[in-house]
Amino acid sequence: MKGISIGEAARSSGVKVPTIRYYEQIGLLPAPPRTEANRRLYESGDLRRLAFIRHARELGFEIDAIRTLLTLQDDPHQPCATADAIARSRLIDVEQRLVSLTALKTELQAMIEGCSQGRVDHCRVIETLANHGQCVNPHH
């Protein structure tokens, strides 16, 4: 039997051993063949799949979206409309998060700029945290 151990697969793919086991458990990665000593053996296709999953996770795709994308990858003759829709949905999530983070940044800047750096009873940071109504943007 050829293949590499789960430890080698982890080092090669950048995915931790427990995460590889989890991906197998939830069906993102097929269960590999095992040696007589019951050790998993991974092939190059498994490593490519792990790299795909790792990259998708780094980009913030949810497990269900990754499952769908893997299904599409396994049958490359399908139209790519589903993959496009998944990516567009993720982009919308990122854009919404950017708006939220920008509001948060503005609020933190206002708190810091409003701080007299005197006593705590005049501290804008403490005041704002104690009273949400004093926020520059109530939707952060």
Image (spheres, rainbow, N blue to C red):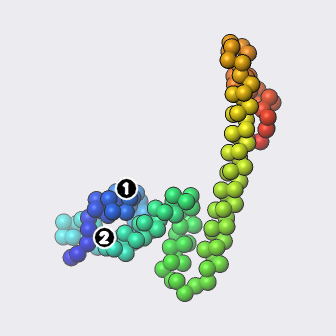
The residue sitting at 52% across, 83% down in the picture is: 76
Task: Report which quarter residue 88 is drawn in.
Answer: bottom right
**What residue sits 55% from the left and 87% below the top?**
77
Residue type highlighted by circle 2: Tyr
Q: Residue furthest left?
A: 36
Alpha carbons under labels 1 and 2: distance apart: 14 Å
Q: Quadrant of residue 114?
A: top right
Query: Closer to the camera, 12 or 117?
Result: 117
Q: Residues within 10 Å of mark 1 (few under 14, many from 20)?
A: some
> Circles 1 and 2: CB distance less than 8 Å?
no
Q: Which residue is mark 2?
A: 42
Q: Secondary structure at mark 1?
A: loop
* 67 relative position to 37: left or right: right
Of the numbered discs 1 and 2, the one sitting upstream in the chain is: 1
Q: Nearer the viewer, residue 85 or 30?
A: 85
Q: How many labels, in total?
A: 2
Q: Is residue 100 left or right of residue 46?
A: right
Left or right of 85? Residue 55 is left
Q: Residue 5's x, y, as percent?
A: 26, 64
Residue 47 locus on image (x, y percent): 37, 69
Local SS, label 2:
loop
Q: Is residue 60 left or right of 127 when viewed as pictured? A: left
Q: Residues within 10 Å of mark 2 (few under 14, many from 20)?
A: many
Could you tell me which residue is drawn at 80 percent across and 28 percent down? Answer: 134
- Identity of the amino acid at label 1? Lys
Q: Residue at x 65, y 78 (%)?
A: 81
Which residue matches tag 1? Answer: 16
